[in-house]
Image (spheres, rainbow, N blue to C red):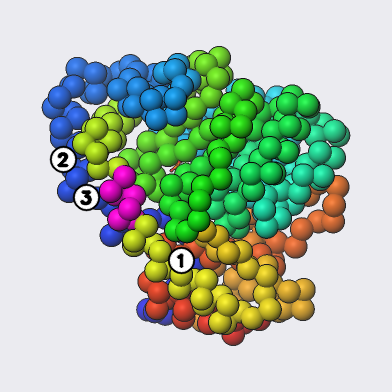
Amino acid sequence: MNDTIVFTRGVPPPEAFPVAQLAECVAAAIQSDPAVVLQYGQQQGYAPLRALLAAEYGVPENEVMVANGSLQLQDLLAAHLVRPGMTVLTEQPGYDRAIMTFRRRGARVVGVPLEADGVDVARLEAEVRRQTPAFLYLVPDFQNPAGVTTSAEKRRAILALAERYGFWVVEDIPYRRLRYRGEPVPMLREINPQRVVTMTSFSKLLSPGMRVGYMVAPAQLVAAITKEGEHTYLSPVLPTQAAVAEFIRRGWLQPNIERLKQLYRPRWDAMLGAVRRHLEGVTASEPDGGFFVSVTLPAEANTRGLVERAKAIGLVLTEGQAFFADPDEGPPPDGERFVRLPFCAVTPQQIDEGVRRLASLL
Ligand SMILES: Cc1ncc(COP(=O)(O)O)c(C=O)c1O
């Protein structure tokens, strides 16, 4: 079908890329510092970029590591922290690639049910009492896949548990700066930096193809992950890191984020409106930013073979089950009822038509 509507990928559309500015910055970065940028080295990331990020977060430079995208940092972190038999906890539903990455490193990945304001803290406590996890992985701002933001109260409660039971909390925040309404909730690291690994990237603010992501964490952990990185890829990709540093130095990042928000806000608005209009009675998230709205279809809805049936009418959906880790002690999740609706790479017209098609299948 040539008018197929794709609700699968949480990626920026081509019109989001600041092409000319990035081209200028890549050229300037290579020309101004070729001996470093074109060479092996800088295993912890390009030093001038680390310095800019350290200043932004108010931390020493040895607490910042820049690598080839944040997913690679998640992988290196799991390689370092997960030992056979250990669990990693995620939100349920959670980011599918993170679940896969942690499993590949040998973890049993257990999902803690996600509510409208973050994970169910009582269920989280029950789970950490059973077994101390290698870490808890959260996407606390405009979560992928559900769109949920963890409340300040829950952030404090989660960190109190981390302190009491002794585990790391990974906050993965690539969407945090794409807020379309309301005020930011404090980052977990603002509440307790000793227990928190902050990860984020420029994939959603500049371009995923640049592969520039970073982590802010206590220095010892950064040193250990730097070693993991060096043993994996020798050195990170430096020209794009240097280009990002140049982009920030020129003062172009915040205006670019404002431009993105202008591009995405009507799409976000269209998705919220379309869900309200076409999916009456369905539980939907109402995110204040990011890339995703999600819906949980009622038990009586016809979800059998939904992805296949959607494809037949020109609607591409991700299998809901992909976002579900192993269940905790509660009942097994019904992934078939969960539908993620990414809105940034589709136009308001496509959004309306796509949600209408979804409704026609239920
Ligand atoms: C929550 C989350 N973390 C990490 C990533 C991957 O980021 P990167 O491109 O920096 O590897 C994504 C990409 O969609 C994401 O949604």
For the residue carrying disc 3, how many other residues have a C-alpha within 10 Å: few (<14), some (14-19), or many (20+)? few
Q: Is residue 103 above or below residue 256?
A: above
Q: In the depicted view, which residue is nearer to us: 346 or 186?
A: 186
Q: Which residues are magenta?
A: 254-260
Q: In the depicted view, which residue is nearer to us: 99 or 32?
A: 32
- Contact flag, marks 2 and 1 (Cβ < 8 Å): no
Residue 158: x, y in percent? 71, 37
Residue 301: x, y in percent? 72, 78
User: Does residue 42 appear anywhere in the picture?
Assistant: yes
Q: Is residue 83 left or right of residue 254?
A: right
Q: Secondary structure at mark 2?
A: helix
Q: In the depicted view, which residue is nearer to us: 43 or 20?
A: 20
Q: Which residue is mark 1?
A: 268
Please report whichever mark, 2 or 1, sits nearer to the chain's N-terminal start. Answer: 2
* Amino acid residing under circle 3: Val
Q: Residue drawn 55% across and 20% down?
A: 218
Q: Is residue 4 left or right of residue 327?
A: left
Q: Is residue 311 magenta?
A: no
Q: Which residue is mark 2?
A: 24
Give the quarter of the image for residue 33.
top left
Q: Residue drawn 46% across and 22% down?
A: 59
Q: Which residue is mark 3?
A: 19
- Contact flag, marks 3 and 1 (Cβ < 8 Å): no
Q: CA distance from mark 2 to mark 3?
A: 9 Å
Q: Which marked residue is nearer to the observer: mark 3 or mark 1?
A: 1
Q: Residue drawn 56% across and 40% down?
A: 186
Magenta stretch, main secondary structure, is helix
Give the quarter of the image for residue 287.
bottom right
Residue 18: x, y in percent? 24, 50
